[in-house]
Structure formats: C-alpha cells, structure tokens
Amino acid sequence: MTVGARSGRLLSSMKAPTLLSTRTLGIVAVLGVSFVASVTVEAAGGGSPRGAGTPVRIVIDPGHGGTQSGAAANGIVEKDLNLIVALRLRELLELDTLDTAGGGEWDVRMTRETDITVSLSARSSMANNWPADRFLSIHHNGFGDPAVNGTITFSFANGTLAADMRDQIHDEMLAGLGFLDRGTSAANFHVLRETNMPAVLTEAGFLTNPANASALTMPAAIEAQARAHMFGLQRHYGQTPYVPTDGPTTYCTAKVASAGCLPAIGSTGTPSLASSDFLVFCDQVVSQQFGLLFWGREELQLPLLGGTLCVGGSATRTAVQFSYGLGNGNCSGRLELDMDSTFLNASGFVAGEEIFCQWWFRDPGQLPLVPVGLSDGLRFRVLP
Ligand SMILES: [Zn+2]
C-alpha cells in the first residue's frame, strides 16, 4: 500500500453548502499531505493474528437445506433457523480465535453457508477429508403432538469424547434457553456414525411447540444457542466459557479538546473482508472544525502542540502509515469513514489484523496548521 491509496472512500453525511465544501476539501487536502509528509510511511506489516497454538478444526453442519426443509411449523422452517444459528456460531468462533484474551483457537468450515441441498454423505465426507477435529450438527425438532417440547442433544455413543462434548453443550443449551431438559442420548444418525471425529447433533427445541417456536426465533435465543455451542466446545477443551470481544474498543485515554471542540470517535457495524458494514465516525464536530481520520496498523502517535498525547497501553508504537482527510464545512455535524469490504480489501488488510484509528482536528483559519483536538483511539480487528 502507498499513501496514494488515499483516494479511497471517505464519506461525509454532512450536507455542507457546495461552495464551503469545495474550499474545505481543498484545504484539507493540503492538510493531509502536509501531515503525511511529516510522518514515517512504513512497509506494510503482517504479523500472524494467531497464537502459537494449533487451531482446532471445527465443522459446523447446519441441518437440511435446499429441497430438504426439515421440520416446519409455527411459521418456522428448520433449515433456515439451523443456518442462522450456525452462521452466528461460526462468527463467534472466529471472533474467539481473533480475541487472544480468552477462549480458544478454532479453524471453522461449514457443510453449507447458504440454502442449498447437501447430502448426508457429502457432509460426513467433507469432515473426514479435511480432517476435522470435531463436528457439530445443528437441528431443531418437530413432532406430531404440539405439546412436546424441550432440548435434546445426541452423540453416536455414550462414554466417549463425543459424549463429553455432547453433555457440555447440552448443559449450556439448558442454561441459555431454559427449555425443558429432555436429556442426552446416543443415536445412530448418519452424521454421528459416519464422521471419524467426535460429533454432536443438537435439537434445541421443538418448532411444533408454540412456546418453543416463538422463543427460538427471537434474536436472544439465536445468540443463546450459538453461545451454548461455543461454551460447550470451550468447556470440552478445558477452557472457561468466554464471550470474545466482537466490537471495536477504544484504547487511548488522552483525549484532547479545546473550547468548542468535542472530538469523539465511534463506530457501527462489523469490519469483515467478506461483508463489512463497518463505519468509523465522529458526530461531535463543532465550530467549523476540520477533521482528519488517521488510521494504521499500529497504535497511533499523533503530535499535538509539540507533545505526544496518546499514552495508552503497552503496544509498540510506530508512526501512522496511512491517513485520510476530510473537511467539515461551516457547521457542526458528523464525519465518517465507511470501511466497507471494498475499502478493506483494496487497502490490503488481512483477516485478524488490528487497525487503529484516531480523529485529529483543527479549527479553520489558523495558520500555521495548529491542531486543537484529538479523539480517543479506536482499535478493531478485521474479520475474515
Ligand atoms: Zn433436523
């Protein structure tokens, strides 16, 4: 990457008058070049996001799909709910891998990621050929009697590694969903019998039971199911159940503000190379300020009035590598950078990489260019 990448996607939701916008952007371009020229531009770094351990290979198997709907009742089609839970479970395991503070390291594959038909033998073969270390099949139940309800979890046999994983996940499912405990059981299902690694099949609840069905479609229950699978897996591997950080965190407490200047940083969405809706913003821009968002691969060290004001953490500090600038016209409002997938990929980011952002401000009309404000820093990880 080069500083030339600066022609990227800086967006502003501000509706500044055209005349002011033009003038502002011109000045900011000068500002940006001026600042970038004063810092070291480094070659792209690329440390591995993973620790020294070997990730556990997990196959997540969302039951049914395509022409095979599975159970269907009370407005829910099983194949759809299975996939929703499975995709969130994958996301959680990937976040857990990226978050080195707790939990484990997982290498995740799915037997399907969309609504397609996949045979049972294709599912077991995929896991055996990889080969996976563990196999998790996600299902929801159905029965003729709508009164029947509750959680059941299966493995091929009792007294096995698979049964241990089964029991751990089952307990977490009960704790997370609060449904009736229908117990754990051995079952002669294809995906449990034909997989060479410990395998578990979960039936969180009955779609044919109105109470189970209405609960299962709630976002909280989907999250609870996904977490229960992750927690059970973590326990099975001797880890304490851990919810990984799945949002950006601020890291710098040395926020600086002048009168009429309230720089603050925030974000929405998830930064992902596959489908990012990540947005970094500042919505407290006042007093005709100009704002620049500086971002890089290391914690930023921005000079402000001759001092170094970012003093958080123990991260190795190097100069900012890349920067974007954006002016905000003669009004207060919001600045934002849309870090969508196109932006992240075009900028050469890799999954697991930590990115640091910080807003830098100055008031217009001041020469030489004197900064007056600095936001907290924002740290996030790029997801696959
Ligand atoms: Zn099923």
Image (cartoon, rainbow, N blue to C red):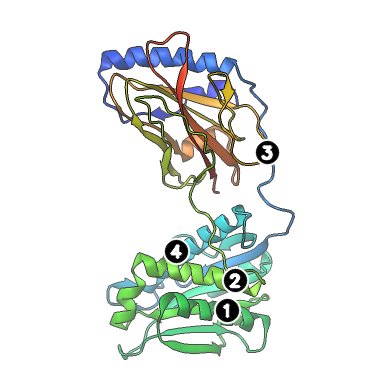
Residue 30: x and y in percent read: 47, 12
What's the CA distance linking mark 2 and mark 4?
26 Å
The reply to whether residue 191 is visible in this rendering is no
Q: N-terminal of the two: label 3 or label 2? A: 3
Q: Residue at x 72, y 59 (%)?
A: 54
Q: Which mark is residue 168?
A: 1
Count numbered badges in the picture. Answer: 4
What's the CA distance linking mark 4 and mark 1?
30 Å
Residue indicated by mark 3: 46
Query: Disc 1, disc 2: CB below 8 Å?
Result: yes
* In front: label 2 or label 4: 2
From the viewer's perspective, tell me whether residue 360 is left or right of residue 54: left
What's the CA distance linking mark 3 and mark 2?
30 Å
Considering only vertical position in the picture, is 123 above or below 384? below
Q: Residue at x 47, y 85 (%)?
A: 152
Query: Element type at marker 4?
Result: loop
Q: Which mark is residue 116?
A: 4
Q: Residue at x 48, y 60 (%)?
A: 113
What's the CA distance linking mark 1 and mark 2?
7 Å
Query: Element type at marker 3?
Result: loop
Query: Element type at marker 1?
Result: helix
Q: Residue furthest top?
A: 367
Q: N-terminal of the two: label 1 or label 3? A: 3
